[in-house]
Amino acid sequence: MKYFKLNNYKDYSIFFWIILVSIIGITITTIYTTNKEVEAQKIKGTLDNIYLKKITKEITNSLEPRYSSLDYVSRSGDTYQSIVDSLNIIKEEKKILLESILKEKSLKILRTNQKFTFKFDNMTKFKIIEFKIETDKKNEIIFTSSNTKNSFTSKKIKKNFKKRLVYKETSIIDSLYNSAINLKISPNIIIEFARLYGFQVDFQRDIWKDDSFQIIYEEYLNDKNQTVDTGEIIFANLNLQNNDLQLYKYEYEKNKVDYFDENGKSIKKTLMKTPINGARLSSSYGKRKHPILGYTKMHTGTDFAAPTGTPIMASGDGKVMKAGWCGGGGKCVKIKHNKTYQTVYAHMSKFGRGIKKGVRVKQGQIIGYVGSTGMSTGPHLHYEVIENGRKINSQKLRLPSGKILKGEDRKKFEVTKIKIDVLKSNLITKDN
Ligand SMILES: [Zn+2]
């Protein structure tokens, strides 16, 4: 019995030790963690010190591999000189480089989006071992440094790039950018897509969940069938709240390419200076004596006198932000065209059919009718253009002219459009 009891006591003592060890363990871990945080804070503080940062950078630099390479894509405003100057090499080497480039006839003109690749040996005085300049998507010139390193020999190389057209579509879950990235669309194409739609869509606000897009663009593949580059967008459609905004690439003149909607209208939209037919400009933008208030006041719009009931048009594609009472402006409509421009139409007698907040309108669509509501002496349209939140003189607007394809041009465009539509359905069937 005694023996048994002792054994029992031993069992308890094991529990006691386990608990004790656990408590010590937890305490030590807590102290250690706190210390580690303090330590980390200290290290961070030290790294923030500019002097040390510099030293760390130097250390990292010397740890960098001996050979490195750099890719550069030319932008507008670049020159061969400016590109060479931006390289981290000595003056004498820059001179040799530039001379070699300028000797090449096919490199006479530096275009934008021309690709450069430089390969460096970071241990030698003259660093560049080799560099390549793309002359077009399929050709490049490769310059190899001589043994003495004071000249380059050049050789034209044909790149084995195959062009293929890709079709992608998706609904937008969180953002257009993320949805496109998820589809493995290259950032170049996404940026171009956003640029093309910039005249009519505010990407921060106009895109809703479950909006969607379709896109056809060019891709270049190397001999291993890997995508090496992207080309141009051939077709795109952005579906916003069940409205299709389509665009087709079309060469309207030799070497002049633009994007047009399904009606042959350039997507580079201008705003109309006079969004009303048969009206007389009755009061222009500027200081004037207010006809009702009687004192001099800035007139922040343009007035067009016209009989009551004359249709008023949306001066550009956009979204209706307001269709309601605007105090002195009476019944008014406000349209947002893009990030930069908004227009306001005041003193209307009534709104156009279906015109209400949130609705998308096309350039030329009737949004309301002339009236004399609000503070007005007679039937007229008060038209305002707001640029980046500031009211400006609509009659002095300078926007790209919205080209509309007509006659023969229009016929040719229709053929291109049909070809693209056929191509699209082929690509869709191929994908499924
Ligand atoms: Zn006015």
Image (cartoon, rainbow, N blue to C red):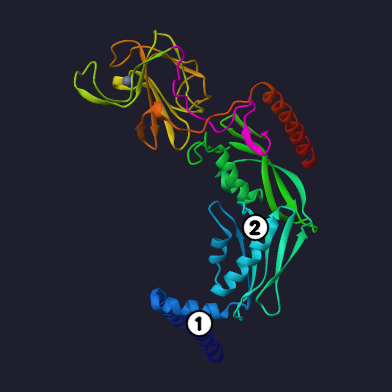
Give the residue at mark 2: 115
Q: Which one is nearer the viewer's eye here, 187 or 287? A: 287
Camera sees residue 38: no
Q: Quadrant of the N terminus?
A: bottom right
Q: Residue at the location (44% across, 37% down)?
A: 340
> Between residues 354 and 295, which one lies in front from this camera angle?
295
Query: Would you place residue 122 above or below residue 206 in this image?
Result: below
**Residue 404 % position (x, y):** 60, 26
Left or right: 238, with 12 as reference point: right
The magenta span reads 252-278
Task: Tell me which secondary structure the magenta stretch mostly adopts.
Answer: loop
Q: Is residue 50 left or right of residue 202?
A: left
Rendering quadrant holding ligand 1:
top left
Q: Position of residue 151 (x, y in %)?
A: 67, 73
Kind of residue sitting beneath label 2? Lys
**Which residue is identified by label 1?**
18
Q: Amino acid at mark 1?
A: Ile
